[in-house]
Image (cartoon, helix red, strand yellow):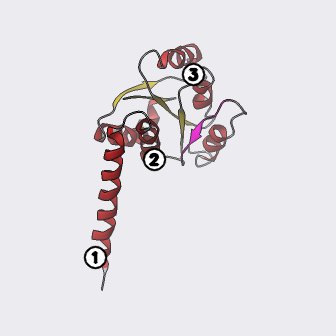
Amino acid sequence: MKVAIVMGSDSDFPVVEKTVTILKKFGIDLEVRVLSAHRTPHQALAFSENAEKNGFDVIIAAAGKAAHLPGVLAAVTILPVIGLPIKSSTLDGMDSLFSIVQMPTGIPVATVAINGAENAALLAIHIMALKYDVLKDKLREYRKQMAAEVEAKDKALKY
């Protein structure tokens, strides 16, 4: 069980760190890289081309502004790629969202919400649960914990 997290810039890490936290909580091996679709395209392509051979199950690609990284990585692998649009100062991340979600037919990229780091991790875990049964039980327990937290908040706020 191994996930690659690739971000276009280290400035994306404060968002990406939430992805790392969830994956570690579920016991997922991971590797975090900074690779740019525009500034280091050859390295990004080589990483993605070799990701399956290197034991990765899913790639999460975080990018802001002209967010081409998820699509570039998806173009050269058959592994599932999850795009994580990063909120930018210019258009509040809408540019990133549109760049990632509008992929051409044949090269799909799953896309989560702008700065949706936790859901990127959880989607990767859901995908891997198809292969690794142990993750199914962990996901069920995670959802029970979420429900218990909501119930405790409800109880605390009742008048």
In which image quadrant can residue 75 be found? Answer: top right
Identify the residue under disc 2.
Answer: 119
Q: Amino acid at mark 1?
A: Lys
From this view, report whether residue 123 is shown above or below residue 52: below
Quadrant where the N terminus sits is top left
Cα distance, mark 3 to mark 2? 22 Å
Task: Please state the horizontal and vertical placement of residue 30, each as a whole percent of the image.
Answer: 36, 28
Task: Choose between 116 and 119: the one closer to the eye.
Answer: 119
Q: Amino acid at mark 2?
A: Asn
> Which badge, 3 or 2, is on the more N-terminal residue?
3
Task: Please state the horizontal and vertical placement of residue 81, each as a whole percent of the image.
Answer: 54, 32
Q: Amino acid at mark 3?
A: Thr
Q: Which residues are magenta?
A: 107-113
Identify the residue under disc 1.
Answer: 155
From this view, report whether residue 16 is shown above or below residue 53: below
Task: Please state the horizontal and vertical placement of residue 154, each as a whole percent of the image.
Answer: 32, 74
Mark 3, residues whose alpha carbon is within 10 Å: few (<14), some, or many (≥20)? some
Quadrant where the C terminus sits is bottom left
Magenta stretch: residue 109 in it? yes
Question: Is 130 placed left or right of 137 in the picture?
Answer: right
- Please give the name of the residue rendered at 45% of the width and 47% of the height, measured from the top-left corner: 119
Magenta stretch: residue 97 in it? no
Identify the residue under disc 3.
Answer: 77
Residues tagged 1 and 3 counted as in contact (Cβ below 8 A): no
Question: Is 99 placed left or right of 63 in the picture?
Answer: right
